[in-house]
Amino acid sequence: MIKSELVQHIAEQNPHLYQRDVENIVNAILDEVTEALMRGDRVELRGFGAFSVKNRPARVGRNPRTGQKVEVDEKFVPFFKTGKEMRVRLNGGVDHGDE
């Protein structure tokens, strides 16, 4: 599902809201999550999951075509861990933990 489909789905479930208002709300939520991650904060949505940022240190990689060594800079990447409630729902009511 892409963002426009999410907006349309939410608007259909809430006919009392204009689609443009739903789009503004979805954009505001995503912007706040992004801003929090940029500050280094963790964003937890109970029952859904948690967004955080992980550091990938600089390293020496390898170009797969040539085999030549390549310096890879340090970077920060977003990370998402599902919440227990979502795992249970996805697995038909059974929690498999962190398998």
Image (tube, rainbow, N blue to C red):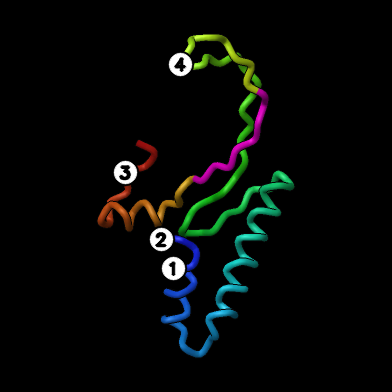
Answer few, some or many: residues within 10 Å of disc 3's Cα (few below 14, many 20 plus, some between 14 and 19).
few
Q: What residue is shown with label 4?
A: 65
Name which residue type carries label 4.
Arg
Residue 1 lies within the magenta run = no
2 or 3: tag closer to the N-terminus: 2
3 or 4: tag closer to the N-terminus: 4
Given this view, does label 3 or label 4 mark the residue nearer the observer? 4
Q: What residue is shown with label 3?
A: 96
Name which residue type carries label 3.
His
Q: What residue is shown with label 1?
A: 5
Residue 78 lies within the magenta run = yes
Q: Is residue 94 left or right of residue 34?
A: left
Image position, residue 76 (x, y; %): 65, 35
Q: How many dots with numbers?
A: 4
Distance (Cα) linking label 3 and label 4:
39 Å
Given this view, does label 4 or label 1 mark the residue nearer the observer? 4
Q: What residue is shown with label 2?
A: 1
Residue at coordinates 61% horizontally, 53% vertically from top-left? 43
Q: Is residue 41 left or right of residue 23?
A: right
Q: Residue furthest left?
A: 92
Distance (Cα) linking label 3 and label 1:
30 Å
Magenta stretch in the rendered image: 73-80
Is disc 3 in contact with disc 4, using a CB cutoff of under 8 Å?
A: no
The one nearer the camera, 58 or 40, is 58
Image position, residue 47 (x, y; %): 46, 59
Answer few, some or many: residues within 10 Å of disc 2's Cα (few below 14, many 20 plus, some between 14 and 19).
few
